[in-house]
Image (cartoon, helix red, strand yellow):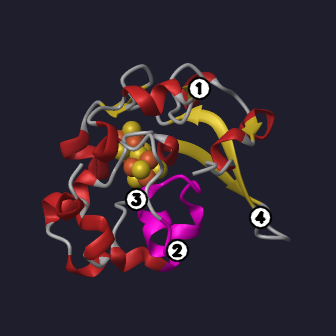
Amino acid sequence: MTKDKAFWRTTALEDMSDSQWESLCDGCAKCCLSKLIDDETEELYYTNLACDLLDTKKCRCTDYEHRFARVTDCVKVSLKHRESFGWLPPTCAYRRLSEGKDLPQWHPLLTGSKAAMHKAGQSVRGKVIHESLGGDPEDHIVIWPLADCSD
Ligand code: SF4
Ligand code: SF4
């Protein structure tokens, strides 16, 4: 990786092209997990229940083009919703860059593929089931999506 290719270190999020913005997504699919918010404390909890449209092995939406029409609470990650980046996992590139951090060492932009991310256990692969099969979300609360990475 040459320095000039590391555009995320020299280009502000608001100045990125659409393709640069899209390439920041590591494809971890943690944002496709059901989340709960405590009514009293407003604390966010992740579950191991994935959106039914998610291919849980490939960690990829099976109908990306029509995702907003098919899943009402599917949220587009954009700067318009920057104030809600806090609900994204700490490893998420959009959250990290908005907090002044760099990408994690396993990020596909640095390694050239998703293999290192999967190997580091940073995607949902092998850890989730579809929400329609899961029953009560409160029985599926997990902490691993909220773990930060060490780099
Ligand atoms: S959590 Fe962030 S990096 Fe991971 S899939 Fe969602 S938007 Fe992409
Ligand atoms: S519709 Fe697709 S992108 Fe949206 S939450 Fe479901 S799997 Fe993820």
Q: Is residue 68 above or below residue 43?
A: above
Q: Residue at x 70, y 28 (%)?
A: 135
Q: Is the CB of the residue bearing disc 2 within 8 angstroms of ligand 1?
A: no
Image location (x, y in percent) of residue 150: 64, 49
Instruction: Say whether marks 1 and 3 touch (CB < 8 Å).
Output: no
Image location (x, y in percent) of residue 129: 57, 23
Residue bearing the label numbered 4:
43
Q: CA distance from mark 1 to mark 4?
A: 21 Å
Q: Secondary structure at mark 3?
A: loop
Residue bearing the label numbered 1:
128
Q: CA distance from mark 3 to mark 4?
A: 19 Å
Residue bearing the label numbered 2:
99
Nearer-N-terminus badge (1/4): 4
Does any portion of residue 125 appear in the rendered image?
yes
Instruction: Say whether marks 3 and 2 touch (CB < 8 Å).
Output: no
Q: Amino acid at mark 1?
A: Val
Nearer-N-terminus badge (1/3): 3
Q: Looking at the image, is mark 1 or mark 3 nearer the viewer?
A: 1
Q: Amino acid at mark 4?
A: Glu
Image location (x, y in percent) of residue 98: 45, 74
Residue bearing the label numbered 3:
75
Quadrant of ligand 2 in image = top left
Range covered by the magenta-colored residues:
83-101
Does any portion of residue 70 appear in the rendered image?
no
Q: CA distance from mark 1 to mark 2?
A: 28 Å
Q: Looking at the image, is mark 3 or mark 2 nearer the viewer?
A: 2
Q: CA distance from mark 1 to mark 3?
A: 20 Å
Q: Amino acid at mark 3?
A: Val
Q: Secondary structure at mark 2?
A: loop
Does the magenta run of residues contain 96? Answer: yes
Could you classify mark 4 by the number of other residues whose Cα lies within 10 Å: few (under 14), some (14-19), or many (20 or more)?
few
